[in-house]
Amino acid sequence: MTISLRPATGADLMAVGALHQRSRVAAYSSFLPAEALADPTPEAMGRYWTERVGWEGADHRMTVAERDGRLVGFSYLGPDDAGDPATGLLNAIHLEPDERGRGTGRALMVDALDAMRARGWSRAALWVLRENAAARRFYEHGGWTATGEERDDVIGATVVPQLRYARSL
């Protein structure tokens, strides 16, 4: 039962969307109301990823993780959203809820950091929900530190604060 990583294909994106929705519900349900997590549907999330990869595919990279042929996680990275040419942005790491603690997230993070280095970036950044203590611990354990920058996002109708993290590559 080993994990394997590979570049995502267009055929993966609907399944990535469904996985993303399951991951969000599992990770955020302790601090967000159920109605905030009810939408988008897994199908809508799949369409979102199909569209997003369609417009960002030239300079972004999605990697999927499989365990025994089953899609169990993904990462997505691209250029820094603040425009720093020396920084790459880790847009997402999401896992099937039963994959937590099995090394899959770590494998995706190491792979993403290697890909950022290969693109010539010397720094990596990401945004994480402030209330997502498990994700914050995961990133901090991986060498990321909070920069002090904050922004708000909206999930459903709920405003959620995000914290920016960064690390050297």
Image (cartoon, helix red, strand yellow):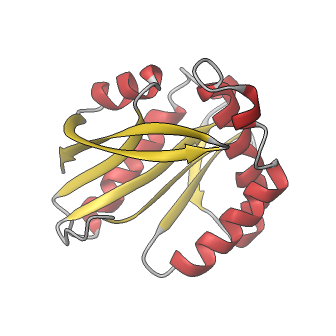
Residue 80 point in image, percent of width and height: 30, 64
> Residue shown at 69%/36% (left/top)?
36
Q: Is residue 149 left or right of residue 72?
A: left
Q: Is residue 64 left or right of residue 17?
A: left
Q: How many marks?
A: 0
Q: Is residue 169 above or below residue 121?
A: above
Q: Is residue 49 above or below residue 112?
A: below
Is residue 138 visible in the rendered structure shown here? yes
Image quadrant where one finds the N terminus: top right
Q: Is residue 163 above or below residue 115?
A: above
> Residue shown at 19%/38% (left/top)?
148
Residue 115 point in image, percent of width and height: 35, 60
The residue nearer to you, when weighing 5 against 80, is: 80
The residue nearer to you, when weighing 63 against 59, is: 59
Is residue 70 visible in the rendered structure shown here? no
Residue 13's image quarter? Answer: bottom right
> Residue shown at 42%/45% (left/top)?
152
Residue 116 point in image, percent of width and height: 30, 61
Residue 159 point in image, percent of width and height: 52, 40
Q: Is residue 75 above or below residue 119?
A: above
The residue nearer to you, when weighing 139 against 117, is: 139
> Residue shown at 62%/63% (left/top)?
8
